[in-house]
Image (cartoon, rainbow, N blue to C red):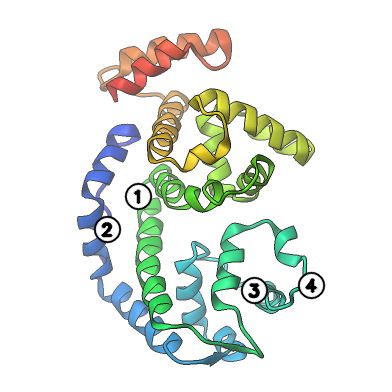
Amino acid sequence: MFQPVIPLSGNSGWNFLQSTYDRQLEAYSNSPQIRQDREYMTEKLSQPITLDDFMNDKRLLRVTMTAFGLGGEEWKGGFIRKVLTEVSDPESTFLPRLNNAKYTEFANTLLPLLGEIQLDEATVTDLGDRFEAASFEEAVGEVDDDMRLSLNFKSEIGAIAGSGSSEDTIAYKILGDIPIRTLLETATNLPSGISQLPVEKQAEIFKDKIRSAFGISNLSQLADSDVTQKVIQRFHAMQSISNGVSSTAPGAAALTLLQAGTSQSGLGSQASQNLFLSLL
C-alpha cells in the first residue's frame, strides 16, 4: 500500500504535505485495499440495510466509521447501537450530553428509521470520498502523528467553529474533541493538567487563550482559512520547542530567541514567535 511521504517535520513538513496532498491522496486512494473497501461500502449502502445487518457487518461498520473520523472505534458495538438508536428519538438528550461532533454527524447521517438505514446516492458518494481522506489521515499518522493532527484540525474545525454556535458551545465542542483539543492546547501552550479543572473553568481558559494567541475576537474565526493555518503553524512551532531542533535547521536561531522568551514569560515574546514562524 502507498505510504505517505513526509520528509521533514514541523512547519517545513506541513508545507510539503499541503503542496503534495492531492497527488498523495490520489495515489493512496488507488491502493487496492482502499479502493476495495470503498467499493464494498458503496455497494452495501446504496440500498436499504437494517440496523442489525449494518452492525453485524464488521467490515462495513469499520469503513463507514472511518469516513466519520471514528476509525478504530468500531469495537464499541453496544455504544454505537445506542448512538444510532437514540438519534431517532426526538426526546433523547443522549447525543447533546455526549458532546461529540463526530458521533453526532455519524448518527444524523445514517439516521435509522424503523430500524433501517436508507442513504441517497450523493451521500454514499460523499462517504466514499471521506473514507479515502480519513484513511489517508490515519496513514499520515503512522509516519508523523503531528501531521495527522494538523490534517484533522484543518478538516474538522469548520464543523466545530463555523456552525453559528455561541462562544460557549464552540468551547465545549473543542473540549469534547480530543484531537482538536490536543492541537489547541499545544498551540496555545496550555498544560494538559487543566483537564483536572471544572469544565466551566476549562472553557473560560480555552476561550481566553485562543483569542489572545491568535488575535481573534470570537472562536468562530477559527474556521477562517487564514486563522486555521496560523493555528497549525503555531502548533508545529510549539512542538519544535518541546522536541528541540538541530542548530543547523532553518529557524534554529529564531527558536533560541523564542525559547529564551518562553522561559521568562511562559509563552515567549510575540516578536520572537513571529520571527520563528516566518523562518519555517
Q: Which comes before the other along the chain, label 1 or label 3? A: 3
Q: Which comes before the other along the chain, label 2 or label 4? A: 2
Identity, as a three-letter code, of the amino acid under mark 2: Gln
CB atoms at circles 2 and 1 under 8 Å apart? yes
Q: Secondary structure at mark 1?
A: helix
Residue 2 in which image quadrant: bottom left
Left of 240 or right of it: where is 32?
A: left
- The residue at 71%/35% (across/down) is 202
Q: Which comes before the other along the chain, label 2 or label 3? A: 2
User: Can residue 45 be seen at all in this image of the molecule?
Assistant: yes
Q: Secondary structure at mark 3?
A: helix
- Front one among 142 and 201: 201
The C terminus is located in which quarter? top left
Residue 277 in which image quadrant: top left
- The residue at 63%/49% (across/down) is 173
Q: Which residue is label 3 attached to?
A: 80
Report how far apart the C-alphas of labels 1 and 3 lie in the structure. Answer: 29 Å
Report how far apart the C-alphas of labels 2 and 1 lie in the structure. Answer: 8 Å
Report how far apart the C-alphas of labels 4 and 3 lie in the structure. Answer: 19 Å
Crowding near the residue tagged with mark 2, few <14, some 14–19, many ≥20 C-alpha atoms within 10 Å? some
Q: Which residue is label 1 attached to?
A: 143
Residue 128 in which image quadrant: bottom left
Crowding near the residue tagged with mark 4, few <14, some 14–19, many ≥20 C-alpha atoms within 10 Å? few
Q: Position of residue 79 (x, y in %)?
A: 69, 72
Q: Which residue is label 2 attached to?
A: 3
Q: Which comes before the other along the chain, label 2 or label 1? A: 2
Q: Position of residue 255 (x, y in %)?
A: 38, 16
